Image (spheres, grey):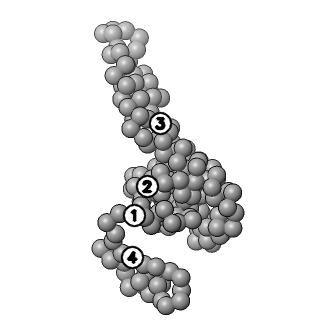
Amino acid sequence: MNPAPAVQALAAEGSGVVVTGTVPDVRPFLAHAQVVVAPLRIARGIQNKVLEAMAMARPVVLTQAPAAGLAAQNGRDCEVAADEADLAARVLGLLGDDARRARMGEAALDCVLRAYSWSAHLRVLDGLLDVQPPEPGGQEDIPTVIGELADAAPSQVA
């Protein structure tokens, strides 16, 4: 799917903007990015584009919609903007601070490894397999067991 004409127009000669459309592999583009921006107004679930950037140790500035399901801390692992002006200010702030950009990129990678790696999910599965079913007529009930399972899952922080 190619970007809308309004987006393509951003790449006017001399603008410094490159609009690629669909690419077979985003990694070469992310590798050159100083900051990755996800200005989504609507997002359902965790956005892979955000996780891909974070997994490549890139600082990410995003809107509240894609941040909603993300197990990341605002200001440490990513920057969550409240509106368009805040988004621009956060991007410019990161572009102007090499050390902060590097710290946030490393924190983003740590966040992905901590919450989204295979080992993180296998720990949750292991916790599910370790839960004992309640004894018939015993004190423990299904909501208690479900609570234990929820405690085993990686927490979500905004």
**For the residue labelled by badge 1, is the local secondary structure a helix, a strand or a loop?**
loop
Could one spot residue 79 in this view of the protein?
yes
Eyeballing the image, is 4 above or below 88? below
Q: Name the N-terminal-most of marks 1 and 4.
A: 4
Point 49% across, 54% down: residue: 56
Contact, mark 1 vs mark 4 (Cβ under 8 Å): no
Task: Please tell me which residue lies in front, 33 or 148.
Answer: 33
Q: Amino acid at mark 2?
A: Glu
Residue on which disc 2 sits:
52
Residue on which disc 1 sits:
26
Q: Name the N-terminal-most of marks 3 and 2.
A: 2
Residue on which disc 3 sits:
154
**For the residue labelled by badge 2, is the local secondary structure a helix, a strand or a loop?**
helix
Q: Amino acid at mark 3?
A: Pro
Residue 89, which numbered label?
none
Q: What is the quadrant of residue 124 in the picture?
A: top left
Residue 20, which numbered label?
4
Q: Is residue 127 left or right of residue 84?
A: left
Q: Amino acid at mark 1?
A: Val
